[in-house]
Image (cartoon, helix red, strand yellow):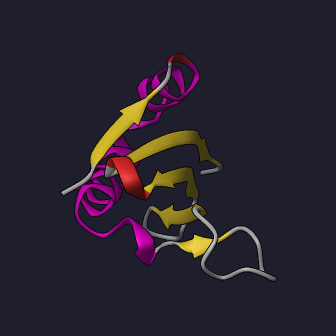
Amino acid sequence: MYQVSVDEQSRAQIEALPAVALAGFAEVRAMLELAPWGGESLNLANPDAPVRTLAFGAAHEGLVTYLILEAQRRVDVLDVLWLG
């Protein structure tokens, strides 16, 4: 299991999510704890890169960008974006 870390910026973005986004974000959060490598790499030239993204929401209106620190079994949430 991975520890998920959220900084002040990401925490504010999460707190600003509308109610319709919360269930989808909760699913992403659970996935980050169990299998963070399932997201897509931001670096197309390096599919194994540790900076990754996951879409969420009914029509994928949300996007979480995060960094996997494998040696520490930690995931740092870098950005949470909602376009819905």
Q: Toward which corner of the image does residue 27 lie, by quadrant?
A: bottom left
The x, y position of residue 24, in whole percent, is: 34, 57
The x, y position of residue 4, in whole percent, is: 33, 42
Outermost residue on the right side: it is 45
Q: Residue at x 54, y 50 (%)?
A: 66
Outermost residue on the left side: it is 1
Q: Nearer the viewer, residue 32 or 74?
A: 74
Q: Using residue 65 as the reference point, say whether residue 30 is left or right of it.
A: left
Q: Toward which corner of the image does residue 70 lie, by quadrant?
A: bottom left
The x, y position of residue 78, in whole percent, is: 58, 39
Q: Residue at x 46, y 62 (%)?
A: 56
Q: Residue at x 35, y 47 (%)?
A: 72
Q: Quadrant of the N terminus?
A: bottom left
Residue 36 falls within the magenta-colored stretch? yes
Q: Nearer the viewer, residue 2 or 12?
A: 2
Q: Residue at x 30, y 70 (%)?
A: 35
Q: Decide: is 80 above or below 10.
A: below
Q: Using residue 73 as the reference point, say whether residue 47 is left or right of it.
A: right
Q: Decide: is 80 above or below 65.
A: above
Residue 6 falls within the magenta-colored stretch? no
Outermost residue on the front side: it is 71
Q: Which residues are magenta?
A: 9-38
Q: Toward which corner of the image does residue 6 lie, by quadrant?
A: top left
Q: Nearer the viewer, residue 9 or 56?
A: 9
